[in-house]
Amino acid sequence: MKFSNEAKVGLTVLLAFLVAVVGFRFMRDVPIFRQSLEISATFERGDGISQGSIVNVSGVKVGSVSRVQLTPDLQVRVVMRLDDKIPIPRNSVAHLTSLGIVEGKSIVIRLGDSDELLQFGDEIDGVYIESMTEVLGARSEEIAGDVSESLSELNVFLRQLNTAFDDDTRVTLDQTLESASKAAQGIAELLENKQQEISDAIDAGSRMMAQLDTLATDSRPRIDSVMVALQQNLEDLERVRNEVESATANLNDILGKVNNGEGTLGRLVNDASVYDNLDELTKELTELVRGINENPGRYLRHMSIIELF
């Protein structure tokens, strides 16, 4: 089957158009055979971000930047095209940051926890994060001043140190080091000469500890008997304490009854009339005894001898 020249030209143009479309979508990092999710985020600045920059989620590339625009209020609006198979919650946040010192800027999406997902054309919050090089660049003058001041102080210290270590000081220092070396050598020689004595002292200490252990072992039955006797004494003391507590409880009970007027002793203690009657009876008995002693016939004149005997 032969094609005319016009058909060949048309087919060539169609293929070129298809190649151009595919290449254009490929260069813009747009999926060729499936639909993409387009969302946007606004940042206060957009240093280092450009069309084609990578968009990451959890460290995995999910799309790229398609457009970078400047808003009327001088904010930077970044439009991103993402794989529509990646679910992006509505409360997610886009961070414009640098993934490394030598790498360029990229967008890192921190996924939220919302159940509602982003749709085509939605916008999420954007946060610009300064990289390490930007922080160092902003503080370069301050850091340079601190470094210069530190170097100046170091130079002053080195000059003072060089001035302090004059020839006499160096000689003294050498003599001190030499004396310390001789002292260390003398200590080493002393330890070497006294090594046998040190070993003997260690052996004597070991023998003494062994004797103490043997003495403790031999005296263990006596110690056990003393502990048994001590335990028996403690039990006797416990029994005596219980008896004293019981006696104290009984005494408290008796005193309580006396205070409450129970029994003869309680009545005597708590009833004043009983005491008065006893006192009156005592006085009368005293008068009777005194009268008998002074005039016994007074009490015997009404008695006859016959009736008496």
Image: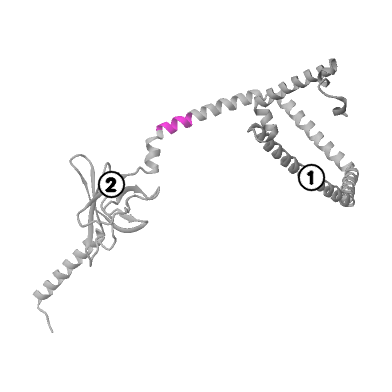
> Where's residue 107, x and y in %?
31, 51
- Say above or below: 271 vs 207: above
> Mark 1 is on which residue type?
Leu
- Does residue 107 belong to the magenta stretch? no
Residue drawn at x 73%, y 23% as measured from the top left: 281
Image-based side of 139 in relation to 107, left or right:
right
Dot 2 surroundings within 10 Å: few (below 14), some, or many (20 or more)? many
- Does residue 144 belong to the magenta stretch? yes
> Can you identify the residue that label 2 sits on?
126
> Mark 2 is on which residue type?
Gly
> Where's residue 126, x and y in %?
28, 46
> Where's residue 265, x and y in %?
70, 32
Q: What is the residue that sits farthest to the bottom in this orientation?
A: 1
> Can you identify the residue that label 1 sits on?
234
In-front residue for pair 228/253: 253
Q: Which residues are magenta?
A: 141-148
Q: Earlier in the sequence, mark 2 or mark 1?
A: 2
